[in-house]
Image (spheres, rainbow, N blue to C red):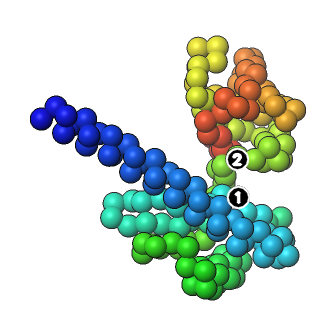
Amino acid sequence: MGFLAIRSAEAFTRRAEQTVVTQAHIKSIVEQMLNEFMEQNGFELVDIEYVKEGSNWFLRVYADKEGGIDIDDCGRISEFLSVQLDEKDPISEAYFLEVSSPGAERPLKKPQDFEKATGSNVFITTYESIDGAKEFEGQLVSFDGQELVVQAGKKSSTIALAKVASARLAIIF
């Protein structure tokens, strides 16, 4: 009985690892499909998610442009991507395609996202504790490509980019 439980746990771990690889692979393929179209049309590809929620898979594309993205822009991106996905058919399971703005609290993923966010309010979580904290909310004072400095009141925290688990713009009321 114990052996079966161990095998089941190992099988579950392998399936989870395969799903992560598959998700990363699909995100990479979709990014390749979109890059040229996005650049030619003045759009920025903010993020791609391929996630399972309940029994359904969702392919989510977050896009933006100077001055903000609107519903018509999202429709153009969706139509282009739908044709590409139908032609190349890289996803074996059924899924829902969603294209939208990243919203006011847009994620910060790439170094250029942090550069653009300098001077803005951010919310950052880290993989490990820094000065006794794993969550930081405040103004992104600087980013040098390797480290970012977040100012919250009188406290300033320096965070290595490699230690950032997630980051997004923050609306502070």
Residue that badge 1 annotates: 46
Q: Amino acid at mark 1?
A: Val
> Which residue is drawn at the image coordinates 53% and 67% (left, top)?
59
> Which residue is drawn at the image coordinates 80% and 43% (left, top)?
111
Give the answer, above or below, for where 54 lies relative to 12: below
Residue 159 quadrant: top right
Mark 1 or mark 2: which comes first in sequence? 1
Res 109 label: 2
Q: In the rendered structure, are the residues bearing label 1 and label 2 in contact, judged by CB atoms less than 8 Å apart?
A: yes
**Tag 1 secondary structure:** strand
Q: Quadrant of the N terminus?
A: top left
Question: Residue 39 location, x and y as percent?
Answer: 83, 70
Q: Is residue 28 left or right of residue 44?
A: left
**Tag 2 secondary structure:** loop
Q: Residues within 10 Å of mark 2 (few under 14, many from 20)?
A: some
> Which residue is drawn at the image coordinates 82% and 47% (left, top)?
112
Q: Is residue 150 left or right of residue 130?
A: right
> Which residue is drawn at the image coordinates 73% and 21% (left, top)?
157
Q: Amino acid at mark 2?
A: Lys
